[in-house]
Image: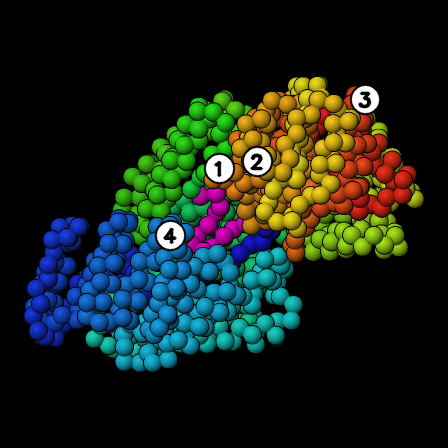
């Protein structure tokens, strides 16, 4: 999970016709026109409220043009009640009615309402698919302007502010002739507002991601100049409101809708003025937004307003109003169980408590917020979100680790850091059902179904503007949450490790120390925006060191070191191997006892070849055998394995990927070298190296060796895969999710040709997911590579490695011996340093 706090976009401000939560009145009959008989015999028509039925018949009798607008309001009525199918049906009906009348702009308005309703009901994927289809099919005016706007809205949902801004600007350019047409003017207003919001967030988002707690951003004058365009666009939206109200179709926009639209724009203008440092104008706009939200009876707008007030108070470092605003937001969010605001309010409140010296209270608030974040682990809602707003828990965990470290709570800080490292995988597994038997599958399905019901009820509660019926909904929600906890408990009783993966693995520092012998030290890293934390755990003690190096600097150093190794230039390598040692290992090397180190890397450090660091003029591998773990909590399960001690080996080499460029020419030689060392090897090469065969045979051998290419996916880590030969309708990809569902009772899995290596912003999540999958499948240890290695040198190293395995050495010691021999033979780190042992092997 990326470490950032994403500011929300006030998408609630982008209100097209009829999207008020409560339709309070039906418009008066429009001016007379040719009578048209309105047929109301279709699906859901009998559920239309009588007032709308009368208005539809009257409109058909006196003025046909109003009929589609009334169907929009019928859709809004059912959307307000939370009836998805009916709302979408009547929005589509409105679109069809517009099309019958040749009103393509009206059809665009109806489609906009349908897409936004899908988003409101939590069906963002469907909404974006629908928007993408319109982008392909609506290529001419005026449909192209609506399609661009919808694309922008979907990009806002993904917090792609730059992409959204581009789409909204394109919509404006595609809609120049908006005057005189209600629907085009409506689109113009919404695109101008959206453009202003996306522009401001694009300019301020990167700063707010990491520094929103330390006053205004650097170069405030430049920022103020850049966000003028965004503020101007928001102001234009208010002007368009007056124009819309003056048109005949304006009668179909209920009064609360107009109030809500202005309230949300005023709220966002309040934030923008705060970013400019205009505190008085900021408060004036926020106060006006709060007043309008109160008049409209819109609870969501009141929450948004309080949230933005909290942001402005943090910017202004207002220690008087800030805590009061945070307390008010906490109370309202708790009442309506809104996870995003519950977390954010506590986070903001903790900052004030910490600044006032109340460290204990700050820690308590952060722990409460973390518990809310972790409670969101479900197949339907793995993140704490509000529309397109995301509170990424990483920033919360970083604040909590920092606070605990300052207070000297070394163990508490360690355990929170490990929870933070485990959460991304828990979120990835949400709803993916990594079951390995029928009982687990049924439990996971029950968990997923309950999570979906919980999300549905939460959304119903979110749509509730008044107190009426709230207690009943809260009671229903509590019952579902109790049932959900019961299912998670049943999963834990069935498979404790699976439960740990789904809930986020915990790491008890004292219990971990009990697993270590006198010869082993565990070094656990946690990278934050400002500092790098390293814990040294041995059997007898635990020590924490804080290194003043933030994420950006750490990533830069790792990438530079890897580039130096890839250059095979001894001078460049020597220039960096000291630097990485000084940065990442020197501060904690005094606390390393024995000659075995276990690394628990984080973020970019997952790609760091620790063995190639320079230690006292020698590589680290000269003095220590090493292993790594995807998380400290995984040690408990890896250490509990009772693997086979035999040498029966299953090997896959050089799968046929349909291109000579992807052939691994020396893979067959690699497999033959293994055969010479171990003897009992069942090998499948070329087209025979299939995914189906790997899944069928995986659990029958002591050692499984893949001399096959691999692909890591930063965007979808569970899709990281080994590339085997396609066969019988599959593409040959053995994914991390596939591996989670497999079983292994042997001693070792080896991966020797993975095309890994860090991307532009390496997080380590993709490589950790693949490694954790093999450990969960049952392997106590995985031999893996950090980058694609020269094939000839791999043949040599594998021969050395398996020779030591045959002698009975542990996996980490076998790798150490093989690497030292490669060094003696003159090989550079590029050939031997990427090999690493993941897991635990006595």
Cα distance between the residues tagged 4 and 2: 34 Å
Crowd tier of the residue under label 3, counting other residues whose Cα lies within 10 Å: few below 14, some 14–19, many 20 or above: few
Per the image, label 4 sits on a secondary structure element best described as helix
Q: Where is residue 414 in the image (x, y as percent from the top left)?
A: 67, 37
Could you tell me how many numbered marks the image carries? 4
Q: Which of 465 and 153 is in front in this view?
A: 153
Q: Name the residue under label 1.
A: 728
Q: Label 1: few (<14), some or many (≥20) within 10 Å?
A: few
| Labels 1 and 2 touching (C-beta < 8 A) | yes
Under circle 1, the secondary element is loop
Decide if residue 644 is on the left or right side of residue 252.
right
Residue ID at (72%, 33%) = 671
- Furthest residue in direction right, as rendered: 617
The magenta region covers 381-398
| Label whose residue precedes the other's in the sequence (4 or 1) | 4
The CA span between labels 1 and 3 is: 40 Å
Kindly report the distance in space between the C-alpha atoms of the residues bearing marks 3 and 4: 57 Å
**Residue 378 among those drawn in magenta:** no
Mark 4 vs 2, N-terminal side:
4
Looking at the rendered image, the disc whose residue lies closer to the viewer, 3 or 4, is 3
Helix, strand or loop at mark 3: loop
Residue drawn where x is 22% and y is 56% of the image: 90
* Marks 1,3: beta carbons within 8 A: no
Circle 4 is placed at which residue position? 126
Q: Which disc, if any, is residue 807?
A: 3
Mark 1 to mark 2 CA distance (whole Å)? 10 Å
Closer to the N terminus: mark 3 or mark 2? Answer: 2
């Amino acid at each position: 999970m990326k470490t950032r706090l994403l500011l929300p976009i006030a998408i609630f401000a982008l209100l097209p016709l009829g999207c008020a939560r409560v339709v309070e009145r039906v418009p008066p009959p429009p001016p007379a026109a040719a009578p048209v008989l309105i047929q109301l015999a279709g699906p859901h028509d009998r559920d239309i409220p009588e007032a709308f039925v009368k208005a539809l018949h009257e409109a058909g009798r006196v003025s046909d043009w109003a009929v589609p607008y009334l169907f929009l309001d019928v859709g809004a009525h059912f959307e307000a009640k939370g009836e998805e199918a009916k709302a979408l049906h009547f929005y589509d009906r409105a679109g069809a009615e517009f099309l019958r009348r040749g009103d393509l702009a009206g059809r665009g308005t109806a489609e906009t309402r349908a897409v936004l309703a899908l988003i409101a009901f939590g069906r963002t994927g469907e909404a974006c698919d629908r928007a993408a289809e319109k982008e392909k099919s609506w290529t001419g005016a005026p449909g192209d302007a609506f399609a661009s706007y919808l694309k922008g809205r979907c990009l806002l949902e993904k917090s792609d502010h730059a992409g959204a801004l581009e789409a909204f600007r394109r919509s404006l350019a595609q809609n120049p002739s908006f005057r005189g047409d209600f629907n085009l003017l409506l689109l113009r207003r919404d695109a101008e507002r959206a453009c202003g919001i996306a522009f401001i967030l694009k300019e301020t988002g990167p700063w707010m991601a990491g520094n929103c707690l330390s006053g205004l951003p650097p170069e405030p004058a430049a920022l103020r100049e850049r966000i003028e365009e965004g503020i101007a666009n928001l102001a234009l939206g208010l002007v368009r409101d007056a124009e819309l109200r003056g048109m005949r179709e304006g009668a179909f926009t209920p009064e609360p809708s107009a109030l809500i639209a202005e309230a949300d724009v005023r709220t966002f203008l309040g934030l923008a003025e705060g970013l400019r440092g205009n505190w008085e104008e900021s408060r004036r706009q926020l106060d006006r937004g709060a007043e309008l939200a109160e008049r409209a009876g819109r609870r969501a707008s009141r929450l948004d307003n309080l949230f933005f007030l909290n942001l402005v108070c943090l910017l202004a470092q207002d220690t008087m109003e800030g805590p009061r605003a945070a307390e008010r937001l906490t109370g309202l969010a708790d009442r309506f169980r809104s996870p995003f605001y519950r977390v954010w309010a506590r986070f903001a409140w903790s900052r004030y408590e910490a600044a006032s010296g109340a460290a204990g209270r700050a820690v308590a608030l952060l722990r409460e917020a973390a518990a809310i974040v972790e409670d969101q682990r479900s197949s339907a809602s793995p993140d704490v979100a509000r529309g397109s707003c995301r509170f990424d828990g990483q920033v919360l965990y970083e604040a909590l680790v920092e606070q605990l470290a300052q207070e000297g709570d070394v163990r508490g800080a360690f355990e929170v850091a490990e929870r933070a490292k485990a959460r991304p995988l828990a979120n990835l597994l949400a709803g993916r059902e990594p079951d390995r038997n029928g009982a687990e599958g049924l439990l996971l399905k029950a968990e997923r179904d309950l999570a979906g019901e919980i999300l549905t009820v939460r959304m119903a509660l979110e749509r509730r503007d008044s107190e009426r019926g709230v207690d009943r909904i809260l009671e229903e929600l509590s019952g579902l949450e109790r049932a959900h906890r019961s299912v998670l408990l049943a999963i834990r009783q069935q498979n404790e490790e699976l439960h740990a993966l789904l809930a986020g693995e915990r790491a008890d520092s004292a219990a971990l120390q009990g697993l270590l012998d006198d010869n082993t030290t565990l070094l656990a890293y946690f990278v934050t925006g400002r500092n790098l934390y390293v814990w040294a755990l041995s059997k007898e003690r635990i020590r924490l060191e804080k290194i003043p190096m933030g994420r950006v600097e750490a990533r830069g150093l790792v990438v530079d070191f890897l580039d130096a190794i890839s250059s095979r230039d001894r001078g460049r390598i020597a220039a960096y191997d000291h630097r990485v040692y000084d940065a990442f290992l020197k501060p904690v090397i005094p606390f390393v006892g024995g000659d075995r180190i276990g690394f628990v890397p984080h973020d970019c450090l997952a790609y760091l070849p620790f063995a190639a660091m320079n230690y006292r003029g020698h590589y680290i591998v000269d003095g220590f055998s090493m292993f790594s773990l995807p998380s400290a909590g995984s040690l408990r399960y890896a250490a509990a394995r009772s693997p086979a001690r035999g040498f029966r080996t299953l090997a896959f080499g050089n799968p046929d990927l349909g291109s000579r460029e992807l052939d691994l020419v020396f893979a067959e030689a690699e497999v033959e070298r293994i055969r010479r060392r171990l003897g009992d090897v069942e090998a499948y090469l070329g087209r025979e190296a299939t995914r189906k065969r790997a899944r069928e045979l995986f659990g029958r051998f002591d050692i499984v060796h893949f001399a096959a290419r691999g692909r890591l996916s930063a965007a979808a880590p569970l899709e990281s895969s080994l590339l085997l030969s396609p066969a019988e309708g599959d593409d040959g990809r053995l994914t991390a999710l596939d591996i989670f569902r497999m079983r292994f009772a042997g001693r070792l899995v080896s991966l020797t040709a993975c095309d890994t290596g860090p991307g532009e912003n390496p997080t380590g999540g993709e490589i950790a997911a693949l490694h954790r999958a093999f450990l969960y499948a049952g392997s106590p240890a995985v031999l893996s590579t950090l980058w694609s290695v020269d094939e000839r040198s791999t043949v040599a190293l594998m021969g050395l490695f398996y020779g030591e395995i045959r002698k009975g050495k542990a996996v980490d010691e076998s790798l150490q011996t093989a690497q030292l021999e490669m060094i003696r033979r003159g090989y550079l780190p590029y050939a031997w340093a990427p090999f690493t042992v993941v897991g635990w092997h006595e």
